[in-house]
Amino acid sequence: MTQPSTTSEIEGRIAKLREKTLALRRALEASFVGHREAVDLLLFTLLAGGHPLLEGAPGLGKTTLVKGLGLALDLGFQRIQFTPDLMPADILGTRILEESASGGHSFRFEPGPIFSHLVLADEVNRATPRTQSALLEAMQERQVTIFGESRPLPSPFCVVATQNPIEMEGTYPLPEAQLDRFLCKIEIPAPTRKELIEILNRTTGVESKPPTGVLGKQDVEEMRALVREVPVSSDRVEEVARLVRATDPNDPSAPPDVRGLLRFGASPRGGQAVLMLAKARALLQGRMWVSEEDVSAVAAPALRHRLIFSYEGEASDISADDLIAQALQAAID
């Protein structure tokens, strides 16, 4: 039977984790300029064992960031370009009829790109809802069922999806059930003038190769296990529970704007996302406890894609982040 880790062993593992994660961050920043918060949220999600959704207008570097992550990790990496004509079999795989030397016939399963450690679902909302749904079981169960047979996916497994804002032409909004499978939604804003100058200098000069293979399979699995070990006080758990309930328009504790502008709030999966991201953030700052600041920092990315607006909410100028800030204040008070 495995003995619990001692304090010194945990501290040593934390120091090793932080050192490797900082190296991974530097590797990402070698190919992606600015937006430290987006880079950190991507790392938090990877270490928490979840799937991130990156949203931003075309040309802001979403794909570049994920490809940089694929290079920095010594893991299998596949990119799937989602288009309206993409079919579920193009993602999951299919059976191929083969003829043997003796003249017999048999089916051989040809795995799709989903059978990889890190999968980039590029412009995921360009595909039809039928194709989008092909990711549901993979993201939740870490397996796919094809032709009545369940096949496990490699571990660690992570889907990093990018999408254009739903207001743009040629997009299909992701189903609410699939949005709920993403641990967080990372918004990529336009770069500042200083960042744009750096981008232009880097991309129009001599190309430099970003670091590769910074973290391997064992490193990622160890990091995920260590994040799970981070304890959370009962006060923090209660705070997160109050936060989630304060996003429910039918709950008496919800702020007036939440009750008037939302149809549905966050599910329990949203509370799990807040805690896991807060644990990863605490650990990467060298702490083995979750603070109120950790919860506040990850609340919006963990919940913004789980709120469903009413018609009045869609017509208002209030964003999901504004409502989450109000719910967070209600939870703290």
Image (cartoon, rainbow, N blue to C red):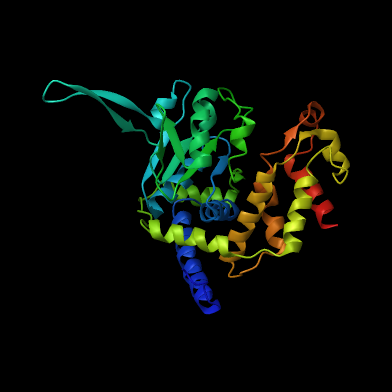
How far across and down, in percent of the image, does residue 143 sit? 45, 39
Residue at 65 percent across and 47 percent down: it is 301
Residue 307 falls in which quadrant of the image?
top right
Residue at 58 percent across and 42 percent down: it is 182
The relative height of residue 234 versus residue 34 in the rendered view (above or below) is: below
The relative height of residue 297 versus residue 287 in the rendered view (above or below) is: above
Residue 112 falls in which quadrant of the image?
top left
Foreground: 68 or 96?
96
Residue at 58 percent across and 52 percent down: it is 41
How far across and down, in percent of the image, does residue 296 sit? 72, 56
Say whether residue 6 is visible.
yes
Left or right of 310? Residue 88 is left
Foreground: 166 or 86?
86
Residue at 31 percent across and 31 percent down: it is 110
Residue 265 falls in which quadrant of the image?
top right
The relative height of residue 294 versus residue 307 in the rendered view (above or below) is: below
